[in-house]
Each structure stands twice: as structure tokens, then as C-alpha cells.
Image: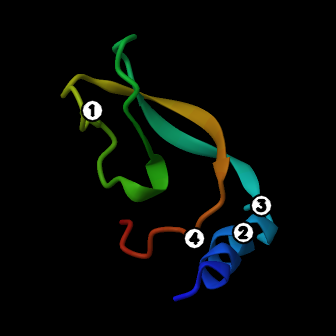
């Protein structure tokens, strides 16, 4: 691969359109120092434990990138 080929791949990603954002329901860790959170659409339980620290999580909302819904959600 030539160096000009490399720069084409590296700089080519800059021209992509930004992903659409939307207000999304999430679970957020209740521990102040923990940054754990997950989308509600991608969880199965109504009472979540943080995957990072194991503490309780509470419902919240975040402005994050829109992605397809989980087809396996009950």
C-alpha cells in the first residue's frame, strides 16, 4: 500500500454525515464516581445493577445517537 492510499482511507472518514441524536431512556448508576449507564431498550430487567460497579441503577434520559431497537426485547 502506498502512503497516498493510506491518507485516502484516513481522511475519507471525515466526510461522513453525523449520526442523528435523540432523547433516549437509559439506566444510570447511582454511585457518583461511577460512569456506568445503558440504554433501556437494550436491557431486559426493570431493576438493573451497574455492569461496572454492581450498584443500583435508576431511570434517566440522555441525548445520544439513534440506533435500531432491540428485536429481542420482551
Q: Is residue 21 left or right of residue 62?
A: right
Q: Residue at x 76, y 59 (%)?
A: 20
Q: Which badge, 1 or 3, is on the more N-terminal residue? A: 3
The quadrant where residue 6 appears = bottom right
**Front tag of 1 and 3:** 3
Q: Are marks 4 and 2 in contact (CB under 8 Å)?
A: no
Residue 15, percent across and down? 81, 70
**Front tag of 2 and 3:** 2
Q: Which badge, 3 or 4, is on the more N-terminal residue? A: 3
Q: Residue at x 60, y 35 (%)?
A: 61
What residue is pinned by disc 2? 11
The label shown at residue 18 is: 3
What residue is pinned by disc 4? 68
Instruction: Give the CA separation, mark 2 to mark 3.
Output: 15 Å
Q: Which badge, 4 or 2, is on the more N-terminal residue? A: 2
Instruction: Give the CA separation, mark 3 to mark 4.
Output: 16 Å
Amino acid at each position: 500500500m502506498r502512503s497516498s492510499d493510506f491518507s485516502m482511507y484516513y481522511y475519507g472518514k471525515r466526510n461522513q454525515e453525523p449520526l442523528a441524536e435523540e432523547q433516549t431512556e437509559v439506566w444510570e448508576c447511582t454511585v457518583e464516581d461511577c460512569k456506568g449507564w445503558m440504554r433501556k431498550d437494550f436491557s431486559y430487567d426493570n431493576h438493573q445493577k451497574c455492569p461496572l460497579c454492581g450498584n443500583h441503577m435508576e431511570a434517566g434520559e440522555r441525548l445520544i445517537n439513534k440506533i435500531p431497537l432491540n428485536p429481542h426485547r420482551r
